[in-house]
Image (tube, rainbow, N blue to C red):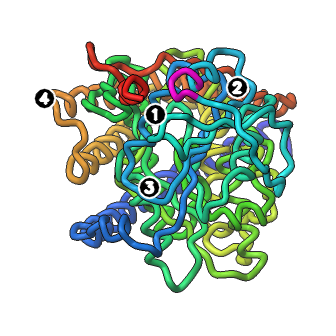
Amino acid sequence: MNYDELIRFISYFLDKVFISYAFLLVFSYTALSIVSGIALNHYLKKNSFVDYSVILDSPLAPSVSVLVPAFNEAKTIVDNVESIYTIHYNNFDVIVVNDGSTDETFEELQKAFDLEKVNFALNHEIETKEVRGVYKSKIETYSNLIVVDKENGGKADALNVAINVSDKDLFMAIDADSILEPDAVLKLVKPFLERTDRRVIAAGGVVRIANSCVIENGRIAEVCVPKNLLARMQVLEYTRSFLMGRMAWAKLDGLIIISGAMGMFDRDVVVQSGGYAHTIGEDMELVVRIRRYMSEQREKYKIEYVPDPLCWTEAPSNISTFGRQRSRWTRGTIETLTDHSKIFFSPRYGAMGMLGYPFWFLFEWLAPLVELIGIIYAIVLYATGNLSLNFILITFLFVYTFALFFTTWAILYEELTFHRYERKGDVFRLWIAAVLEPFILHPISLFFSIKGNIQYARGNRNWGKMERRGFRHKNGRKSKVQLLANKN
């Protein structure tokens, strides 16, 4: 084979690879959107007449611990704890773990909730860093609040400490910048109660972006589309991911991630699996590991997903913070997929091995790399006169139209189901963001995904600093915890 023949062969091979990959990608996302629509319609019909007060009053309702790992979360931690105390549930406690914060996180908690140090017998089922002290609130309303102060060990270590402290049936892990909906626990507990054919080991819910929303007494008082364009485009990402992606994967039994911002787990299964691993993608890794554990134990199990908006979180509003988050997500994905590579196309692990893992490998990990290679390849072909400008424009138009259609469909899903954005012009502003997203957010995401791959290859396993701006509050209002503290 001479040089010219080799070049033609490589060109032919790459053409086939890129065309096949693009076809699979379009087919996969289209299929997921259809499955998601069917599953969502079924869920809404099934739950339209559910009386959650039955769960609230039931003696069979499982006990729940709400776990909040906190590192340098002084701006949002009090709001977060307040939001937890707006939930409608009876048998629960709240365990906040100050993971060696270097800001005023612990001081804010101590001041807001009037904490005092107590003697507490710690359960050491999972090995963790040293605990410096356990505190409880003197305010009667917060008598089930436990605050743990410990040496810094990372988010996974903080969660493991909270699991050791908990004595409840289930635990719900949330981020310290999250605001819960009042019925969040009720809706997440429901799948654990209604399944009889198999054991529900985890349930995830929808996470929404709280930027520009107004917070009052720990609750979302006014839902607003983010004013910041970067945050607004992330609303579209979250809508596609949670409402169209994870809904479908739960239906197909291939779900391998529950957002670290909010998920509910069977405590015993997590402890038996070894707790949270010290990785940069601990949320995804835990789901894959407990699924592996159940499959290897030959136990029937289920991961459930609740599509109602249950939790609101603060999204990055500047490129540097966004970039650190996305490169960390990429590194976390790679680490989880490589650590659990034996799952890949293994029928032993059911839909997770045959569908979920391959999808994440092909279209989450490899997609940015394939796209970068495709862009470089197109530039080379154009520069050598082997690709016309018209073909490039037609291809771009096809990709752009598909992306815009998919996002528009996600916005329509939201409007036809939960309709959380009620202000005039909100949907239009989201759609304008959808028009701009492929030109702004996608290239930025691509850059930081590639950077995450490079960082992982170089051995970078650092978490990265996240900056919080805090939530908007209605003027002239005291928080619920301030009113209670004054009362007491």
Indicate which disc residue 424 carries: 4
* Residue at figure coordinates x 42%, y 62% from the top left: 31
Which range is magenta?
110-114
Q: Is residue 458 left or right of residue 420?
A: right
Residue farthest toward the left in the current orientation of the protein: 424
The answer to whether any part of residue 231 appears in the image is yes
Amino acid found under the numbered disc labelled 2: Lys
Q: Is residue 437 magenta?
A: no
**Residue 250 pos. (x, y %):** 49, 64
Q: Residue at x 40, y 60 (%)?
A: 186
**Distance between the alpha carbons at the discs numbered 2 and 4:** 39 Å
Residue 75 drawn above or below residue 190: above
Q: Which residue is mark 1?
A: 313
Asked whether the residues under the numbered discs 2 and 4 touch, taking CB atoms below 8 Å apart as contact, a structural biologist would say no
Q: Nearer the viewer, mark 2 or mark 3?
A: 3
Q: Amino acid at mark 3?
A: Val
Residue labelled with disc 3:
185
The foreground one among 355 and 270 is 270
Which residue is the site of mark 2?
451
Going by the picture, which residue comes out furthest to the front? 488
- Label 4, residues with CA under 10 Å away: few <14, some 14-19, many ≥20: few
Number of residues whose C-alpha sits closer than 10 Å to that of mark 1, classed few (under 14), some (14–19) or many (20 or more) = many
